Amino acid sequence: MNDKRPSVWNAIIRSGYPGYLHILCLLIFLGVIIIPLAPLLLSTIQFIAKDPVRAAGFALPSGRVLSLLVNSVILALAVSISSTLIGVLAGTWLWNNPYGVRGYLPWLLLVFIPVPSTLYYFAWSSFFPLTGGFSAWWIQVMMYLPLLTIFSYIGLRLVEQEKIESGRMAAPDMRVYHRIVIPLAAPLILAGSGLVFIFSLLDYTVPSLCSVNVYALEIFAQYSANNQAAHAFLLALPLVIITGAGVYFSQYNMKKAFQKVSWERSTPVKGFRWPGWLFRSTQVAIGVTFLGTGFVLVFLLFSAFAGQTVAMTTAMYSDIVFSFATALLAAALCLAPSMAAAREMSGNTRWSGLWWGISMIPLAIPAALAGIGLATISNAPLFEPFTGGIILPVFVCVFRFIPIAAIVLCAQLRMTDRTLLDAGQIFTPGVIREWTKIRFPLFFPGFFIAAYLVFAFTLGELGGTIMVIPPGSSTLTIRLYNYLHYGASGSVAQLSLLLAGLVMLSGVVFLLVLRTLRRSHTIEHANMRKGNHDPGE
Amino acid sequence: MIRVNEVSRAFNGHAALDLVSFTVNDGGAVAILGSSGSGKTTLLRIIAGLEVPDGGEVWFDDHMVSGPGWAEPPYSRSIGFVFQTPALWPHMTLAENVLFGMERVPEEERNNQVSDLFSRAGIPHLTGRYPDEVSGGEARRVSIIRALASRPRIILMDEPLTNLDQKLKEDFMDIVREIAEDNAKILIYVTHDKSEVERIGLPEVRLDHGRRCDDGPR
Amino acid sequence: MMKPIMAGRLVTLSIGACILVACICAGCLTAHPASAQKEVIVYTSVDQVYSEPVFFKFENRTGIKVRPVYDVEAEKTTGLVNRLIAEKANPKADVFWSGEYAQTLDLQKDGVLVPYHSNEADMIPSQYRDANWYWVGLGGRARVILINTRFLAGNQAPGSILDLANSTIPGDRIGIANPMFGTTATHASALYAYLGPEAARAYYQGLKDKGVRVIDGNSDVRELVEKGDLYIGMTDTDDSCEAIARGSPVSVILPDQGSDGIGAFIIPNTVALIAGGPHPSEGKVFIDYLLSAEDENDLMKSGWIQVPVRPDTTEHGCLNVSGIHGMNVSMTAVAAQNDQSRQELADIFMR
């Protein structure tokens, strides 16, 4: 017998997928995360080498700064826990009302993602004096409640119908709800809690408006005082470590949460009998959730029509187009690298936890620091061709929101039946055909949701964009914040409505695409029943 | 010929396969028998190219297709695979599921072959249906059709009779017997049920905790 | 014939692809690579609402296209200055136009600026420019006390900012913007320079002990005074004039104007040429325009500045500032107090 063992090189080439393409996308993913951070890390290392004692002083908070950190963590915990309790009840209401118009309500909650947090403050402060920790807590809960409601809703929806029904055979519905449904939904709910904790901890805008000092503001105060990125980075380290713990908590639960159930098979629950107090609690909770967003919407509408209409100048049209282009490009470019990372994250290897950690790094880095890193690196002659265009604003948004895309795609991978992918590998010639015919259709919902979320977040991004936006260009959000400072509440309201409208329009497109695909399936099915179908055509 | 030479594979420090070897000649068939956790599905997936062995080699004739830390892509191995679940793609009709793997079949023959296979399986009326519109037994038949339609040299079956009623089991065992008797194909059949092996009449390779525990030829 | 499901998918994907390509092209078009037309790149912390009309008028007058980069107060003015420093090795900007001067002095210290002696600057008093022409001041704002007249009569209002700590008005009805950022931070540095660090620190500690509210920014202070949540607020003249223009029940007090008063702190805008900028000639033309009498009149009329520095400015703002007694402290001396004042104010207010 001939013993034809391949050379190592041949073996690598012949291994094919997941070979070089996957590795390339992983390298791009790592590049996206490392490139903006590299100058910051370098300057920090230089500072540590030059003055280690002072560097330690920044990185290890004490005294006043330590108490700021503790207060910030307490506020973030309070926001996270409150949002979770209300969000679970609100998610339960949505889970119990999945049909008709009510079935679209979860998507409505996503619309307000890019609306500036300051508008929540101004909406509520129009009626109530808002100052102090309670006010900061209230505003943040109103801001993050929609996110937690969506997480709760999805967690509840993903509980398999058979598991619920087998429980309902054996016990009253209420017992099934709190002994079976909630525990099975808990991982995703807790993952959402972890994310809200992180967002709240890193937010300085709302606490600042409510005259509450938080650690995130201390970082900016330091940065503003001496413009030293290394000092700000070291100051941010405790925050990064704490948010890293929040990230670990979230990803640990998300890994547990992603069951192998397709969305279509997780049929909405029917006929659950609720005790009166729970029924009313869920109604109150969903009311509070929509109150938070509806209140802002009403405030915006009222302010928009009460104030002078903003003249749509050429510059404003340009802002809208630039914003839209940046958001679309960021959404599109996120997908391939985040899919590669998601594959590593969803694996059951000892490296998957490491990939989770790497993927979540951008969530813990303040936006302005990321922008400064990218602005610094763009000065190098190698990157000169990329300045002056749309690439850098897109890059900074990809850096900031790629973790969100990776999480969504990881969930999609976990929820996709592995044997379908294996069968695709067996029967498909070539990577490209396998992706276009098998993997992309199976992963389509995940791709679309990831792209939509990155799109929506990018539209509202400010801190990183302002560092790298090319001269002469601007985004709708930058213009909005400028008007906000100027005090043109009518103009701000109109621009905010425009921003929310763009997000809503995109959401409508997204839903129409999904429905088109499903309707095509139905037409095909109807044709088949009429005997019009020709197999193999 | 398929030669599996001292293949090993571990998951999270636990040895799923440990120095397993066996050979199947052209036209031959073998059943890999073992209880849950014995490593039989892992072994099948390594032969298919869906898993990469930590140690050992897999040869198809005189061509090495898997080695330590690498594996040639599954499609390049000319195999048909029947999974434990039907594994039919939900966005394609049953006919499209079958046609999809028929790249190696001349185009002019494909439609006829599909119609013929569906007829022989007793489900000619289902070609235009989608996987979620047919019963489990019907879906299982289509998964077998799909594995055969591409005219592969090697057929791998991973517990294909799981969750089938007795009548269907009998019908499928007849199909498997036919495949086993086809001198143009190699069949590797994985199961935990010894009675299936005896009913079909296949030589055994027995696995226990990842190791071979029978006295058959390596 | 193509199946409906395939046709539907193709149509959807085609539409999506077209939209994506269109937006990419539009985005690339709205970003501006180097072009043959003359242009000047201006980084400005002046509100877009005020600065944009200046740019439009300059473009019409000279034919030089202005490509601005704006800052936003939400980023606590860290944005633009840090961007300029980050770009020092390969500057993208030609001109820096700031609404105050602390940042400009920081940039001078970091070697980001280059001297330019504009003829238009000859009429500007020497206290409002750098001795070596690294930067020049133009009209600006003053720090004032804004009161809500529904709750306070004019005679109840303090005449000096130093009286705020001793006022009979409750502390939670008095507000200042965060002294870590912006003009409030510059004002604090000025008090450190004028009064001395000990006295200034004692003053701010007094405010803290009284329970004076620290609000996010000057415009927020203005809003709260307009609403009546605050009776007294310390803010800038431009914010105050906006409130007056809206007809809000407010009144502005120019503080410390008595013969023994410390004087109102005046914060001029500043403009500077960036070292190594891509269009230095055009940058100089823009600076000349910004420092001109015509432009200072325009800025007065728009409401961005209320205190002119040129003696030939004819336009009057919403406030009568003729004969205003300004705080006698040099901009350089103020800048020298930045580090100490911010550190100590952080200790006092950020806990």
Image: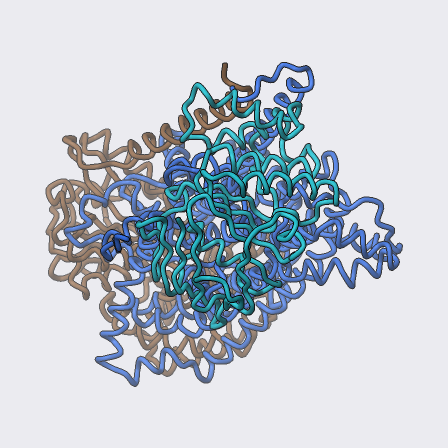
Q: Residue at x 35, y 69 (%)?
A: A232
Q: Camera-side residue: B18 or A203?
A: B18
Q: Camera-side residue: A66 or A97?
A: A97
Q: Residue at x 22, y 68 (%)?
A: C332
Residue A460 place in picture, x, y as percent: 46, 46
The quarter of the displayed image where residue B167 is located: top right
The quarter of the displayed image where residue C79 is located: bottom left
* Image vertical order of residue A498 relative to residue C241, above or below: above
Say which colour chain C has.
Answer: brown
Q: Which chain is cyan?
A: B
**Residue A326 visible in the current orientation:** yes
Residue C77 place in picture, x, y as percent: 36, 58
Q: Which chain is blue?
A: A
Q: Residue at x 77, y 53 (%)?
A: A164
**Residue C307 visible in the current orientation:** no
Q: Residue at x 54, y 25 (%)?
A: B114
Residue A315 place in picture, x, y as percent: 36, 33
State left or right for residue B84 relative to residue C138. right
Q: How is the image coloured?
A: by chain
Residue C212 place in picture, x, y as percent: 54, 70
Q: Camera-side residue: B132 or B173?
A: B173
* Image vertical order of residue A229 relative to residue C20, above or below: below
* Image vertical order of residue C254 relative to residue A50, above or below: above
